[in-house]
Image: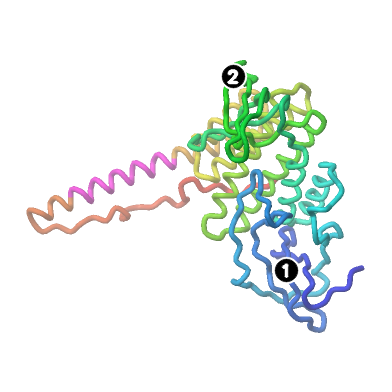
């Protein structure tokens, strides 16, 4: 068992039930307790100069420290593989090892720590070269996240100006696209493991949206989760078998929930409708469909109230120009008891 001392980086529960954990540094040691300084909750790449494929690269600010005192029995040492100082020289290139490490951290409740290991697994398994089958990034303005699959015929250019000649699998048409539009290469050997990694990565991102509520971070996490689920769905579409169908349907439901949490209720409805077409017997999908339907109705009702309030305010302002009148604030009037787009937390 590792000896913990002042300055040690440890893992500790961030909530009472211990299901959400995070990393912290031991500041002082008391009789049977530690004074801890929490690390910023945002996930950090394993390599200093690396960026994530899917997860948001969020600026961290460890100067805003948050401290807590915790019983020594609740504080645990990091896993041995986390203590490697230079992940760049790790000789293991097997993506399954990195996924397993992510799974270990996810089981410990530390989604932020698991994310970079899932990202590393995807990076190692993604090979983009002539002959590769690849996932191509959707249009930046695409409100409903989707991906397309293509085969790479040729790669030209240098540096940031590299392009790829691709053939789209769905249509058979050819195009030339910037190489940067390719998100990952689909591995013939590891394709199912890629799908499972994407599903777990999306799960971690949705968890982070619930626990890391700084500024716009929840929105960034949910947006990235929608991409992870969309990528896993797209890979599954090209495969046959019950396990692939199960993964695809799981991704469809989770993507719908990620869209809803991101405020894109129409996109959420599109996903859950597609799922019900494939699996009409799914009670979970039917229940979620009813939830999204109710949220859309609330959104529509709120929009109508806002329009009516604005009309009243404009009319009052016009009346004020010809005579005394008390303006009606657009925010006056009855308010919804539940925020538009608010989704009841759900578990995986």
- Viewer-nearest residue: 203 or 84: 84
Q: Secondary structure at mark 1?
A: strand
Q: At 71% across and 26% down in the image, what residue appears?
A: 130
Q: Is residue 312 magenta?
A: yes
Q: Is residue 313 magenta?
A: yes
On the image, the x and y values in percent for residue 332 come to 31, 55
- Looking at the image, is mark 1 or mark 2 earlier in the sequence? 1
Q: Secondary structure at mark 2?
A: strand
Residue sticking out furthest to the bottom: 31
Q: Residues within 10 Å of mark 2 (few under 14, many from 20)?
A: some
Residue picked out by circle 2: 174
Residue sticking out furthest to the right: 1
Residue 161's disc is none
Which span is picked out in magenta?
A: 298-315
> Is 68 drawn above or below residue 313 in the view shown?
below
On the image, the x and y values in percent for residue 55 come to 64, 48
Residue sticking out furthest to the top: 172
Q: How is the image coloured?
A: rainbow
Residue sticking out furthest to the left: 322
Question: Residue 214 occupies which quadrant of the picture?
Answer: bottom right
For residue 286, say whether it is visible.
Answer: no
> Is 171 drawn above or below residue 177 in the view shown?
above
Q: At 73% across and 32% down in the image, what residue appears?
A: 247
> Is 62 drawn above or below residue 154 in the view shown?
below
Q: At 63% across and 72% down in the image, what residue appears?
A: 66
- Viewer-nearest residue: 48 or 75: 48
The secondary structure that most of the magenta stretch takes on is helix
184 left or right of 315? right
On the image, the x and y values in percent for residue 14 come to 70, 65
Residue 24's disc is 1
325 left or right of 11? left
- Viewer-nearest residue: 339 or 264: 264
């Amino acid at each position: 068992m590792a000896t913990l001392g002042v300055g040690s980086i440890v893992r500790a529960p961030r909530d009472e039930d211990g299901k959400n954990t995070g990393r912290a540094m031991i500041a002082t040691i008391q009789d049977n307790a530690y004074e801890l300084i929490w690390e910023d909750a945002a996930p950090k790449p394993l390599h200093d100069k690396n960026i994530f494929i899917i997860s948001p690269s969020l600026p961290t600010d460890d100067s805003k420290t948050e401290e807590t005192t915790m019983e020594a029995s609740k504080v645990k040492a990091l896993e041995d593989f986390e203590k490697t100082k230079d992940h760049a020289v790790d000789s293991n290139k097997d993506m399954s090892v990195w996924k397993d490490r992510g799974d270990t951290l996810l089981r410990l409740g530390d989604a932020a720590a698991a994310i970079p290991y899932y990202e590393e697994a995807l990076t190692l398994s993604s090979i983009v070269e002539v002959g590769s089958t690849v996932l191509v990034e959707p249009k930046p303005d695409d409100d409903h996240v989707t991906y397309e699959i293509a085969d790479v015929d040729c790669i030209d250019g240098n540096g940031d100006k590299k392009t790829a000649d691709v053939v789209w699998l769905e249509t058979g048409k050819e195009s030339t696209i910037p190489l940067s539009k390719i998100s990952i290469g689909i591995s013939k050997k590891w394709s199912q493991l890629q799908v499972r990694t994407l599903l777990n990565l999306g799960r971690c991102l949705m968890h982070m949206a619930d626990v890391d509520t700084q500024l716009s971070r929840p929105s960034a996490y949910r947006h990235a989760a929608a991409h992870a689920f969309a990528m896993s769905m797209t890979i599954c579409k090209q495969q046959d078998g019950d396990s692939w169908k199960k993964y695809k349907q799981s991704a469809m439901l989770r993507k719908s929930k990620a869209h809803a949490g991101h405020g894109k209720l129409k996109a959420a409805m599109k996903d859950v409708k597609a799922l019900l077409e494939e699996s009409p017997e799914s009670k979970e999908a039917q229940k979620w469909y009813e939830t999204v339907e109710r949220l859309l109705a609330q959104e529509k009702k709120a929009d109508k109230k806002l329009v009516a309030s604005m009309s009243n305010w404009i009319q009052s302002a016009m009346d004020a120009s010809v005579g005394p009148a008390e303006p009606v604030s657009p925010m006056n009037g009855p308010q919804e008891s539940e925020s538009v787009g608010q989704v009841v937390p759900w578990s995986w």
